Image (cartoon, helix red, strand yellow):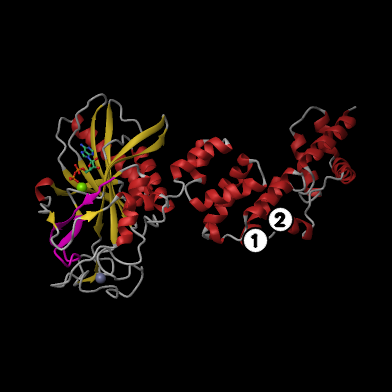
Amino acid sequence: MDYGEFEGVIGLEVHAQLLTESKLFCGCSTKFGAEPNAHTCPVCMGLPGALPVLNKKAVNYAIKLGLALNCTVNRKSIFARKNYYYPDLPKGYQISQYEEPICVNGHIYITTGNGKKKIRIRRIHLEEDAGKLIHEGTIETSSYTLVDFNRASIPLLEIVSEPDISTPREAVEYLKLLRSTLVYLEICDGNMEEGSLRCDANISVRKKGDTKFGTRTELKNLNSFRYIEKALDYEIRRQIETIKKGQQIIQETRLFNPDQGITYSMRGKEEAHDYRYFPDPDLLPLIVDEEWIETIKVTLPELPSEKMERFVQQYNLPQYDVEILCSEKELANYFEETVKLYPEPKAVSNWIMTEFLRELKETDVPIEKVKFRPQHLAELLYLIKDGKISIKIAKDMFPELFRKGISPKKYVEEKNILQISDESLIKQAVEKVILGHPKEVEEYKKGKEKLFGFFVGQVMKETKGRANPKLVNDILREKLKKQSE
Ligand code: ADP
Ligand code: MG
Ligand code: ZN
């Protein structure tokens, strides 16, 4: 992604759905998948006279994230009404925070091709979600629309970055780190497909070296890492082309069409809303004192950025491995448990990043429910290291071990697949192969050395893949040399 004399300027607005049991201002359940409108009450339906009561856990979660993202937690914040009409918004306004949000002025460090980069967080505020509209039939045939208010008033955190992000790649890195931080904190499930994490992007371009920002567009509803990268890249290129043609960028809201890979205009600035924010008279200012913040601070776990830092130091692993291993807390734990039993971090990491993650993806089991535990993996790695089984055999039997949670040691004993390291047995096999392939032996003697691999293959076939490859090599070489003399 090189934009020549231009560079991108990107600021992200991310919405994270909080994992509270009840909604932001009432006791209704936030559980997913209930009958439509089963989780509603006069408060979240906006009935006259109903009064909101703030959910303390949601505030705790907001403070937690604020601390994790190095923000200042405001001692006083204000809930405001964001006024607009839409059928999924029964009150005619959304309760959000505007001028005085709960957290401000944070930052995180992302890893880029040129080392670490600081991305500043402008603000984090609490707000309620809207309901969901379900349009029956296609646009042409639709005769009615249904509304489900189960989601209405579920707590969200909006996390707004400063425009410090320069490339689509950096945007994805930022989002991944933000996502894993939310998941580590256990305040959001991070599921983008289900909408628990949604992202809007503000994008402009400018000539490299310029300090002034260009006119920006806003891309709405980007809900997968892949789309985000593609959409941002397309939009940056579109803006550059526009400027090169001598035209102006129009400030507007755009949408991404994943099938065509393009962005298109949704509404212009003149259609932008004027939300007429004002402090919600039904809610007191939110006061958070030092003591409250302290009680949250002590509950903070090791964060993904800290864990990655430690993994590099402690295990001497490359950044690539570390990012994958730390992407999920449970995966990192699995790795560390295995290393305790088999203290070769890189070997453990290699196995986890390839065979283990492949099986995990195919079986779609959460890591903590995987039957194949760290002690099993350590056992398997010892079997390979001690020359009891070959890597090939280990890989072949892995899916079964993984799915059933069988001890590798027991498995190889029971199935009689321990590697043959008995020299006399291998010698026998080698002799048989040499006797059985006089033509190839003749050619090999004449200098066709490539045939060595062929002989190895035949010996492995003869021993059903169980012969120790190093011994096969040594013995074969010796026997063939004797043939040539
Ligand atoms: P609004 O109030 O319209 O949402 P903000 O000024 O609060 O606008 O900015 C929203 C987001 O847009 C922030 O993430 C910010 O970093 C980003 N942003 C602001 N100006 C630009 C720009 N010129 N180019 C890219 N992103 C920008
Ligand atoms: Mg905004
Ligand atoms: Zn309710």
Label number found at residue 408? 2
Say how many tags the image has.
2
Q: Is residue 334 above or below residue 140?
A: above
Identified at 85% across, 44% down, the residue is 426
Tell me where residue 203 appears, x and y as whole percent.
24, 39
Q: 10 Å neighbourhood of mark 1: few (<14), some, or many (≥20)?
A: some
- Label 1 SS: loop
Tell me where residue 301 appears, x and y as whole percent.
45, 49
Label number found at residue 346? none
Tell me where residue 193 appears, x and y as whole percent.
37, 57
Residue type indicated by callout 2: Pro
Side of 452 where 298 appears, left or right? left
**Residue 230, picture quadrant:** top left
**In magenta stretch: residue 74:** yes
Q: Is residue 27 above or below residue 95?
A: below
Q: Which residue is mark 1?
A: 405
